[in-house]
Image: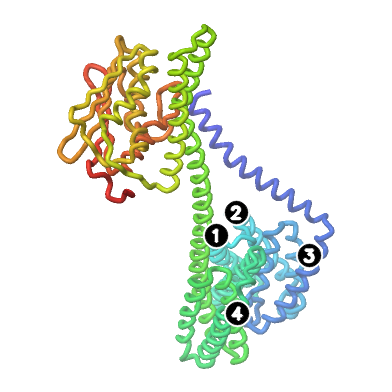
């Protein structure tokens, strides 16, 4: 198969999968019609639809069935998004209500055609939201709010055009009324759905996250009372007198306050209360159609602004909570990693003295087996005892160093430090045919250091140098001591293969090594100790082969060290 053919098959497969997902969704919806809850939900929906139509029947455009506020259509859309199997129920409820309210002014054919257009339009909106935009009424996310505000106004515009043309064709609407009818239908449908559906989303979100627990505080109760009184007064003031309609714009202030302070759910509930208070005021003051539609248009703008702001704030809070949880997880992982690294570091540092103990004890046993009981056996056991003490001291110092980070400084002879390191590694170097040299001046330089801690740094460098020089013929490692100005230097040179370019940039990172049995902790530990002494650890390649590592330490010691 050629890449072109593969791409073509992928292109064909994408819409095929989409159609398959839609088909499986339809099958799932049809199966829902056979469940016992179908009849119960249908009856509940029918009762609610009838009640909302009776409630909003006072706000209709002329003699038509166009309602200037249509929360019942929001309920219908929610039901269809749950399952398209409820399509016949939605159609039947719409026809039944129209027959009850408009039987005298509509023909049966006009009612059926108009409500069929309306129902199919809502089916289309439900499919777009649920399947194309993955809208979920139980999830108050920013993406869901964007999908709602994008799909509903655009789809309601197409629905209003088709519905009003059907009314015009049936003779219910006159030609001069078509434009106003389309505008009024669009405003009523859009605001009804834009306010009702987010309020239902807010209820789901409040229940799912138990947000009511925070509503009992005096601060939140006071805020709810202030918002409720302000909204009611502004609604009444803007509706009571046509000239005061500009006062409705002041509702943006409490809406923004609630959106920023409490997020999407509280904003959606507040907007539902604002809509109900506005409808109540419009009904009480017998507002005309023009004033009704203008205020409902402002309500749409207010709802869209508040819901977007609330969704952004809620999304940010959710992201912040997620980041906090992730940070806590990272801190926990870092703690576990540090504990593991400490354990590995301890194992790394005491492996050499323990190996030396094993070698000396083995040598003493061999001498005893050969009948030797003199000075050679005592010497081997004495060295084993010294290595045991060294392992104990290393564990104690590393524990104190990692736990407290404090150094115990003293004036130390650096030549003696270097001589001890050479003595500790002499046997290992000889066994691997590596010549280990000490180059120290006389008189010896002194520096204020934590002797036991600083011994670990050049000791790790010497161990690495012996490993590298063991492959050379002959192998040579030199530990040099010198002073430059107010600094002391401990330098380790070898004639091995040098540092691999693959890890040269990560040389001092933990667990970076090219040795088959290495753990990559010697250099990081050395660097940590040197830095704690306010010093520096550097390296360079030697010619023709090998590497040179230099430890630079201030002669006066670190300023924050304990005397």
Q: To which residue does mark 3 refer?
A: 41
Residue drawn at x 39%, y 31% is: 522
Q: Is residue 551 left or right of residue 183?
A: left
Residue 137 % position (x, y) = 63, 61
Residue drawn at x 46%, y 36% is: 395
- Taking depth in this image into account, of 549 and 350 the one nearest to the observer is 350
Q: How crowded is mark 3: few (under 14 residues within 10 Å), some or many (20 or more)?
A: some
Q: Which of marks 1 and 4 is in front?
A: 4
Q: In this view, does 536 lie above or below 263?
A: above
Q: Is residue 118 visible?
A: no
Residue drawn at x 27%, y 38% is: 536
Residue drawn at x 66%, y 84% is: 58
Callout 1 secondary element: helix
Label 2 or label 4, whichever comes before in sequence order: 2
Q: How far apart are marks 2 and 4 (CA)?
A: 28 Å
Q: How far apart are marks 1 and 2 (CA)?
A: 9 Å
Residue 209 % position (x, y) = 63, 64
Query: Mark on residue 147?
Result: 1
């Amino acid at each position: 198969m050629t890449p072109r053919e593969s791409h073509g098959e992928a292109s064909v497969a994408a819409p095929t999968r989409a159609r398959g997902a839609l088909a499986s969704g339809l099958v799932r919806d049809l199966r829902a019609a056979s469940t016992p809850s179908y009849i119960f939900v249908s009856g509940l929906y029918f009762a609610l639809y009838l009640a909302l139509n009776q409630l909003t029947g006072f706000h209709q455009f002329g003699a038509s069935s166009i309602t200037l506020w249509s929360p019942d259509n929001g309920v219908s859309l929610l039901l269809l998004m749950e399952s398209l199997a409820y399509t016949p129920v939605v159609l039947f409820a719409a026809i039944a209500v129209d027959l009850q309210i408009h039987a005298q002014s509509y023909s049966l054919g006009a009612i059926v055609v108009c409500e069929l257009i309306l129902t199919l339009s809502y089916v289309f909106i439900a499919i777009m939201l649920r399947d194309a935009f993955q809208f979920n009424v139980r999830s108050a996310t920013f993406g869901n709010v964007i999908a709602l505000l994008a799909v509903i106004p655009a789809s309601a515009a197409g629905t209003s055009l088709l519905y009003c043309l059907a009314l015009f064709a049936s003779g219910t609407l006159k030609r001069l009324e078509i434009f106003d009818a389309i505008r009024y239908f669009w405003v009523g449908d859009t605001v009804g759905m834009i306010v009702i559906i987010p309020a239902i989303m807010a209820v789901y979100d409040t229940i799912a996250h138990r947000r009511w627990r925070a509503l009992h505080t005096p601060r939140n109760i006071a805020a709810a009372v202030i918002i409720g009184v302000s909204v009611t007064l502004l609604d009444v003031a803007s509706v009571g007198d046509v000239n005061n309609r500009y006062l409705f714009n002041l509702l943006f202030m409490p809406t923004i306050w609630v959106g920023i302070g409490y997020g999407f759910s509280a904003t959606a509930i507040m907007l539902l209360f604002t809509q109900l208070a506005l409808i109540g005021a419009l009904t009480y003051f017998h507002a005309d159609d023009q004033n009704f539609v203008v205020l409902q248009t402002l309500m749409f703008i207010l709802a869209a602004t508040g819901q977007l702001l609330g969704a952004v704030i809620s999304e940010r809070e959710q992201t912040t909570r997620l980041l906090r949880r992730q940070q806590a997880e990272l801190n926990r992982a870092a703690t576990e990693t540090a504990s593991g690294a400490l354990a590995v570091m301890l194992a790394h540092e005491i492996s050499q003295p323990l190996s030396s103990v094993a070698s000396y004890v083995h040598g003493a046993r061999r001498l005893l087996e050969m009948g030797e009981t003199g000075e050679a056996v005592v010497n081997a056991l004495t060295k084993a005892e010294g290595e045991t003490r060294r392992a104990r001291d290393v564990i104690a110092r590393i524990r104190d160093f990692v736990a407290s980070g404090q150094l115990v400084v003293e004036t130390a002879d650096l030549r003696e430090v270097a001589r001890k390191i050479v003595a500790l590694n002499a046997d290992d170097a000889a066994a691997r045919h590596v010549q280990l040299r000490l180059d120290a001046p006389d008189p010896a330089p002194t520096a204020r250091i934590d002797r036991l801690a600083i011994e670990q740094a050049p000791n790790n460098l010497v161990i690495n140098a012996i490993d590298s020089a063991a492959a050379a013929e002959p192998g040579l490692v030199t530990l040099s001591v010198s002073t430059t100005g107010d600094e002391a230097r401990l330098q380790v040179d070898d004639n091995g293969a040098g540092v691999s370019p693959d890890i040269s940039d990560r040389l001092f990172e933990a667990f970076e090594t090219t040795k088959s049995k290495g753990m990559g902790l010697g250099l990081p530990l050395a660097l940590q100790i040197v830095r704690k002494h306010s010093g520096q650890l550097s390296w360079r390649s030697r010619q023709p082969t090998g590497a040179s590592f230099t430890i630079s330490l201030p002669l006066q010691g670190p300023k924050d060290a304990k005397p």
